Amino acid sequence: MPRPADQFLWNDEQKLVAHRNMHHLFPTHVVKAGAPVRELPRQAESGALEGLARMGADPTAYMAEAEVTGLLAIWHGRIVLERYARGNDESTVWASRSMAKSITSVMIGTAVRSRHIRSVDDPVVDYVPELAGTHYNGVTLRHCLQMTSGVPYSEDYQDRSSDVARLQLCTVQGKKGAFVEFLKDLGSRRDRKSNTPGSVFNYCSADSVLLGLVLERALGRTAPLQLERELWSRAGMEEDAYWNLEAEGGSAFTASGVGATLRDYGRLALFVLGGGVLPDGTRIVPDGWMVQSVIPSRASIEAGSPYGFQWWLHEHGGVVSSKVGAGDAKLRGGSTAFYALGNAGQVILVNPAEGTVVVKWAIWGEPSQFEERRRQDRTFFATS
């Protein structure tokens, strides 16, 4: 097994092994599924393949070239394409990486609906008072949801001294309370300039971890317990999921660390596409929560990467995302589309205008190849 502490340095072969085994490599809470299973009817793949061929796309070639290990497309509730590669199959439980951030956002929505969280404009120190007296005094949940907390933070996966590397190490030390200590240190730093909360978009996994702590303090239970209670046991999931923790019995790594099957990620995407309503018609987030979740902050628009409540937007107001949407390929329904993204090429694409969701797993290896991999994704998604 690859060394957990080297996660950001794993090559593609190490990721292939590790992303099927994150629940063995890190402390984990199992998220139980519940009956009945939400059936996903199938439409003959031949129609989808013919349509892709007319657009010059071949899913087999795309998967091989773009290091894709799982691909699922659901159109109007029906599976139109489901493929696996590199030893994965329908029972494989695969790592979300940062797609978990979007799940964390949904969990915040459930706590707002139940009024355990009063408002996304509440100060985070109201829920995590250990951070009082640091930069976080002026930070709200909205700032964290939109990655505009302003905390001095670096997310460089290749730099072992970067803040994200230090944050990830909290999950291999076996120490409960490690995330709170990390955030206290981060919020107290004076060696780098902070920004006024709300003024600058800076992709920051620490913001997502703080949201998980807020959720835990507000509810009296961790994010994976809330995910099981509100969604996973009620949304017709086929298999149990998992969520990695900082330590056994500790807080969840709500910036990453979820694992689920391909079809269950698809069911999650359908729940989001439906506005946060379970198959039985029960709404578990506030009315309009998903609409609010994909309204980007002004700061992210100015940065060229429209970003909502832990969701990447394809485009907004003529600004096409430099993260997911740039390039010549045009996505049908792109003005409504949004994504959950993971560092190794994981994608959940939700396209309301087309009634489509796409889930993709991958094992992107060298960072120097990432831009080419994104171009391949854009091209394929535009033909889907």
Image (cartoon, helix red, strand yellow):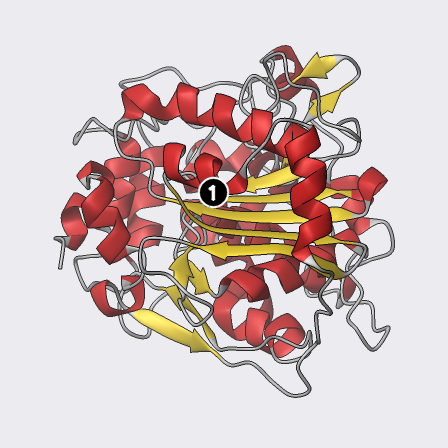
Residue 131 lies in what quarter of the image? top left
Q: Nearer the viewer, residue 324 or 115?
A: 324
Please name the amino acid that badge 1 sits on. Answer: Thr
Instruction: Pick the quarter of the image with the C terminus.
Output: top right
Q: Nearer the viewer, residue 218 or 106?
A: 106
Q: Position of residue 44 (x, y in %)?
A: 71, 59
Q: Nearer the viewer, residue 338 or 87?
A: 87
Q: Determine whether, in the image, residue 26 is placed left or right of residue 203.
A: left
Residue 332 lies in what quarter of the image? top right
Residue 131 appears in view? yes
Residue at x 60%, y 13% (from the top left corner): 304
Q: Position of residue 55 (x, y in %)?
A: 68, 27
Residue 252 appears in view? no
Which residue has dot 1 on it?
A: 60
Q: Position of residue 359 (x, y in %)?
A: 57, 50
Residue 301 lies in what quarter of the image? top right
Residue at x 53%, y 41% (from the top left corner): 59
Residue at x 72%, y 38% (from the top left corner): 51
Instruction: Pick the quarter of the image with the N terminus.
Output: bottom left
Q: Determine whether, in the image, residue 192 is placed left or right of residue 200.
A: left
Q: Nearer the viewer, residue 360 or 112?
A: 360
Q: Position of residue 205 (x, y in %)?
A: 42, 39
Residue at x 69%, y 86% (from the top left corner): 36
Q: Determine whether, in the image, residue 228 is placed left or right of residue 356.
A: left
Q: Determine whether, in the image, residue 240 is placed left or right of residue 122.
A: left
